Image: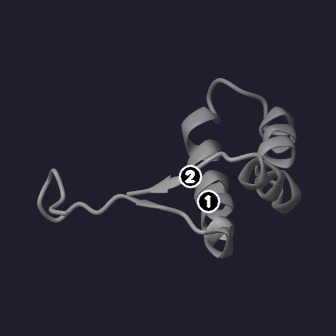
Amino acid sequence: MEPLIPGIEVRIVSEEDLWQVRELAFQIFRVTYQDIVEPRQIDYMMDLIYSPEALVAQWDSGQNFLIV
């Protein structure tokens, strides 16, 4: 299947690649929310949503993660 936008690939992350979701979240959230959310709130969100255990639980429940 041809990509909708040439040169842009979107794929569903495999369980083995969940660490990439975590790494991206850690980089993106801090920069994006640093001016509107306290650092400890960001830390809380990272632990709640993007800890390895949380990501696996989300994966096991059927959630898909996409990487562009």
Q: How is the image coloured?
A: one colour
Question: Three-letter amino acid code at disc 1?
Answer: Val
Q: Residue at x 23, y 60 (%)?
A: 8
The x and y percentages for residue 18 are: 66, 65
Q: In the orientation shown, which residue stands out farthest toward the bottom?
A: 16
Question: Three-letter amino acid code at disc 2?
Answer: Phe
The x and y percentages for residue 33 are: 62, 33
The x and y percentages for residue 7 are: 16, 65
Q: In the orientation shown, which residue stands out farthest toward the left?
A: 6
SS at badge 2: loop
In the displayed structure, 32 sits above or below 35; it is: below
Q: Give the number of marks.
A: 2
Bin the neighbour count of mark 2 within 10 Å (Cα to Cα): few under 14, some 14-19, many 20 and up: some
Q: Quadrant of the C terminus?
A: bottom left
The answer for how far apart the CA atoms under marks 2 and 1 are is 8 Å
Residue toward you, 34 or 44:
44
Residue toward you, 4 or 49:
4
Bin the neighbour count of mark 1 within 10 Å (Cα to Cα): few under 14, some 14-19, many 20 and up: some
Q: Which residue is mark 1?
A: 21
Residue 65 tag number:
2
| Image quadrant where residue 60 sits | bottom right
In the displayed structure, 34 sits above or below 56; it is: above
The x and y percentages for residue 55 are: 76, 54
In the displayed structure, 41 sits above or below 28; it is: above
Residue 39 tag number:
none
Q: Given contact means CB atoms under 8 Å apart, are the residues at marks 2 and 1 in contact?
A: yes
- Mark 2, mark 1: which one is toward the viewer? 2
